[in-house]
Image (cartoon, helix red, strand yellow):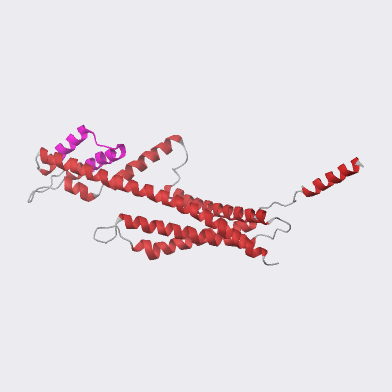
Amino acid sequence: MEDVTTSQRSAAIGSSTVEAKTSAVSWAAILAGAVVAAATSLILVLLAAGMGLASVSPGSGSGTSGTSILVMTAIALLVIQWLSAGVGGYVTGRLRTKWVGTHTHEVFFRDTAHGFIAWAVATLLVTSTLASGASSLLGAGAHASGVAVGTLAANAASAGAISNIRPYDLDVLFRTSAGMEAKPGATGAREETGHILARGLVTGDVPAADRTYLAQLIAAQTGASEADAQRRVDDGITQMKAAADAARRSSEMTTILTALAMVVGAFIACVSAALGGRVRDMHP
């Protein structure tokens, strides 16, 4: 009698722990939702560039400040993530197969997981597309090697610093008195000054020796006194460092806002997939 009871219990346990032969992941629905999300994101980016962000001019007199541009960019990122993730997640939930005999809690978890995976795949698709486009612009010389990567990083930092030095800043440093013409070596002096200032922006400050040399160079080219030339150098370096710090803070804020927008997009993809799956289960 005891053996019969044990065998019945084993049979009951075995029947309740039978594993399904197919995976719970519906990759077809996930890939379909990811492609839809990536395409929707691309369309929204083009619309934002053509209708909103392209009309913003950060130049002086335009009436739009850097803070306004940052706010508009954040809003655009949030809207793009919300809409693309919502559409992709909903498509994923509606296209998956109906799970028969599965608890509602498990169905909800699977749907949210499908939405999150679809969002992740869409993000990888968009990122890989942008990365492949950027790598094609770099050319064949940008292969992954230690020396090449270090050289590219140094050149990128120097190029970024030089781009922060506006031509107007150099014009102020080499501004001559009324009626006085610039000397023949002014072009070379301006280029050398730009290199010194760019290195100072990369390292964080311009050494005192370089400041003195720049003052002497400007005094020789413009005819100004060394005291006036030194004042020009100090004021110019202070303004350039302030502009570089503002650009760095703006870049950091943009990165943080992008990360937050992606987190919100992942959440919306999960909710949309659960909603789409629920609507799917309401129909045979």
Across and down, in percent, residue 218 comes to: 15, 41
**272 w.r.t. 205: above or below:** below
**47 w.r.t. 164: above or below:** below
The residue sitting at 63% across, 62% down in the picture is 278
Across and down, in percent, residue 256 comes to: 42, 49
Which residue in the rendered view is the most extreme toward the left? 179
Q: Main secondary structure of the magenta part?
A: helix
Query: Quick check: 118 left or right of 133?
Result: right
Q: Quadrant of the C terminus?
A: bottom right
**Picture quadrant of residue 104:** bottom right
Which residue in the rendered view is the most extreme toward the top? 209
Q: Quadrant of the N terminus?
A: top right
The residue sitting at 66% across, 54% down in the picture is 105
Looking at the image, how many numbered discs can be counted on the residues? Answer: 0
Query: Quick check: 281 left or right of 82?
Result: right
Whether the magenta-drawn stretch holds residue 16 is answered as no
Magenta range: 191-218
Which residue in the rendered view is the most extreme toward the right? 1
**Picture quadrant of residue 64:** bottom left
Query: Foreground: 22 or 166?
Result: 22
**Picture quadrant of residue 237:** top left
Query: Quick check: 134 left or right of 86?
Result: left
Which residue in the rendered view is the most extreme toward the bottom? 283
Across and down, in percent, residue 177 comes to: 9, 48
Across and down, in percent, residue 88 comes to: 56, 60
Whether the magenta-drawn stretch holds residue 217 is answered as yes
